[in-house]
Amino acid sequence: MPDETAQAGLNENTASALAYITIIPAIIFLLVAPYNQSPNIRFHAWQSLFLNISLFVIGFVNVLPIIGQLIFLVVFIALFVGWLMAILKALKGERLELPVIGKIAAKQAGL
């Protein structure tokens, strides 16, 4: 009988994509082995954290009447599209470096 060992946990692509769903999986993947040992998963987790921080910060611009709300809308749509593209690339096993935060995430992941 051949020795069949079941793979425990998530595969790398799934874990990378899940890191973008909320900040909770991203933090878990940064803290728990074997996920924190994969540079690809670490990159996606860090980028997800920085993306969520960006969304939080841009939310304060929404308080300003008219111009602040227009800026918020444009930036929010851009971040949302980037978020969707990052998830789809992560599912394929690829990396999408978002402008500004992608370079910071790569540095934090050790890439």
Image (tube, helix red, strand yellow):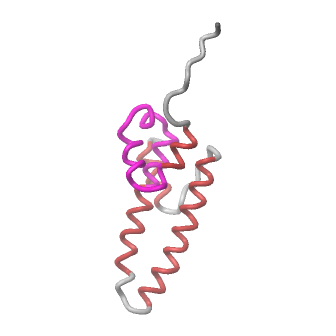
In which quadrant is the N terminus drawn?
Answer: top right
Instruction: Depth check: give the residue in front, 97 or 33.
Output: 33
Tell whether position 35 is magenta: yes
Q: Position of residue 27 (x, y in %)?
A: 37, 47
Q: Residue at x 40, y 74 (%)?
A: 58
Task: Residue at the far top: name it.
Answer: 1
Q: Is residue 33 left or right of residue 20?
A: left
In this rendering, would 97 be left or right of 52? right
Please give the range of residues in magenta: 19-48
| 50 is within the stretch colored magenta | no
For the view shown, which residue lies furthest in the bottom direction? 66
Q: Is residue 35 above or below residue 74?
A: above
Residue at image position (46%, 54%) is 47
Judging depth in this view, the residue of 22 and 44 nearest the camera is 22
Which of the pair 18/44 is nearer the observer?
Answer: 18
Q: Quadrant of residue 67?
A: bottom left
* Prevalent SS, magenta region: helix
The x and y percentages for residue 56 are 37, 69
Q: Position of residue 53 (x, y in %)?
A: 38, 63
Residue at figure coordinates x 44%, y 31% from the top left:
34
- Residue under the point 55% across and 71% down: 78
Percent from the top left, x then y, of residue 82? 56, 64
